[in-house]
Amino acid sequence: MSPTASAARRPFHPPQLAPSPFPYHPGSLLSIQDLTLESLNHILTRATALTNQDPLKRDRILAKRRVALLFYESSTRTRTSFELAAKALGCDTTLVSSLSSSIEKGESLKDTGLTIRALGAEAIILRHNSSGAPWLLEECTRLPVLNAGDGMHEHPTQALLDLRTILAHVRPGVTEVNADTLAGVTVTITGDILHSRVARSNMLLLPRLGAHVLLCGPKELLPELAISEGPGVSIERDFEAALRKSRVVMMLRIQGERLAGLQLDLEEYKANYQLTGDRLRKLAPQAIVMHPGPIIRGLELTAGVADGAQSTILEQVSNGVAIRMAVVERALTAGMNGGRA
Ligand code: CP
């Protein structure tokens, strides 16, 4: 028997990996997978309670606590909503941006994080162009780190605010989620799946609540090998077929800055995948239309659809403040009563 054949017959025992030490801090939110169902419900409940609370009482919850926003990539929604959320709870916030700090002079993420900690920050909100950067920052600083988008990897607070938006439309009145909450709901995510941290975090979250996620796009933006279809996630290349099944249509921006080297014909893309008023009226008249922003009108969707009655784009933005208040509160209070929120 050849050595190859004998190796093929040997039973495969996967290596025993030590349990992941991440997150080190119970208040961190690095991946949407960090959240148990209990934590998820805690965040959703607190988002609503904090939104409804008297602003003059709310700003005493974390009065004078220090939160740093560390942004290596541009952002409008995430940065502003995290800042407004932290301030609404009474925090002092400071922004360190890669374009106007010593990062430009070559300071490393580790040294920047340690410097921010030495300045008194109690939590860091990080957006970084490298996948995995929030894990490194947490390991170096041992502060609670909130992942505000890392490379092409994850954007957990976007998935949470998307969930809050979906629930309001698809399951109005539901205040607590479980494994069946979104049973029977098909969510189509269309566009640049390959580069999308929003798609990844939503693919990891929504099937846990019973939703079926349909990924839709051309091979250039949705290569089969890069996507693990599994329970609750499948690929549908035909956008019109996907629309017919959808209660939720999530459109993604074509990320021009990450397309170098890809052969993508934008006119062909629009012909096959642009969400137009005509397609929406005919194929998904009951669906909500979501988009994490920034939107490129006339590319992934038309201006009429972006501004239309089915669009929840600005509602998603507002939900960002609610969710991020809950996540910042969790970051600065988790573990205080011996437990993990
Ligand atoms: N959705 C989102 O992350 O938008 P920004 O890049 O503007 O923060």
Image: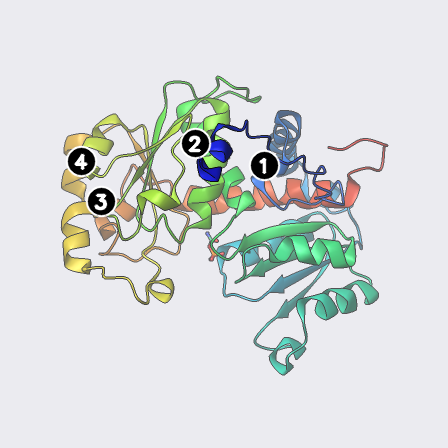
Which of disc 4 and disc 3 is earlier in sequence?
Answer: 4
What crowding class fits label 3: few (fewer than 14 Cα within 10 Å), some (14-19), or many (20 or more)? many
Label annotation for residue 33: 1
Q: Amino acid at mark 2?
A: Ile
Which of disc 3 and disc 2 is earlier in sequence?
Answer: 2
Label annotation for residue 240: 4
Front tag of 2 and 1? 1
Q: Amino acid at mark 3?
A: Leu
Front tag of 2 and 4? 4
Q: Which residue is mark 3?
A: 275
Q: Determine the residue positioned at 49% across, 55% down.
A: 77
Q: CA distance from mark 3 to mark 1?
A: 30 Å
The quarter of the image holding the N terminus is top left
In this picture, residue 312 sits left or right of residue 60: left
Which of disc 1 and disc 3 is earlier in sequence?
Answer: 1
Q: Which residue is mark 2?
A: 166
Front tag of 1 and 4? 1
User: Which residue occupies the extreme front position in the image?
Assistant: 1
Q: Amino acid at mark 4?
A: Glu
Give SS at disc 4.
Answer: helix
Question: Tags 3 and 4 in contact by the CB under 8 Å rule?
Answer: no
What crowding class fits label 4: few (fewer than 14 Cα within 10 Å), some (14-19), or many (20 or more)? some
In this picture, residue 255 sits left or right of residue 133: left
Give SS at disc 1.
Answer: helix
User: Which residue occupies the extreme bottom position in the image?
Assistant: 105
Front tag of 3 and 1? 1
Q: CA distance from mark 2 to mark 3?
A: 19 Å
Question: Tags 2 and 4 in contact by the CB under 8 Å rule?
Answer: no
Q: CA distance from mark 2 to mark 4?
A: 21 Å
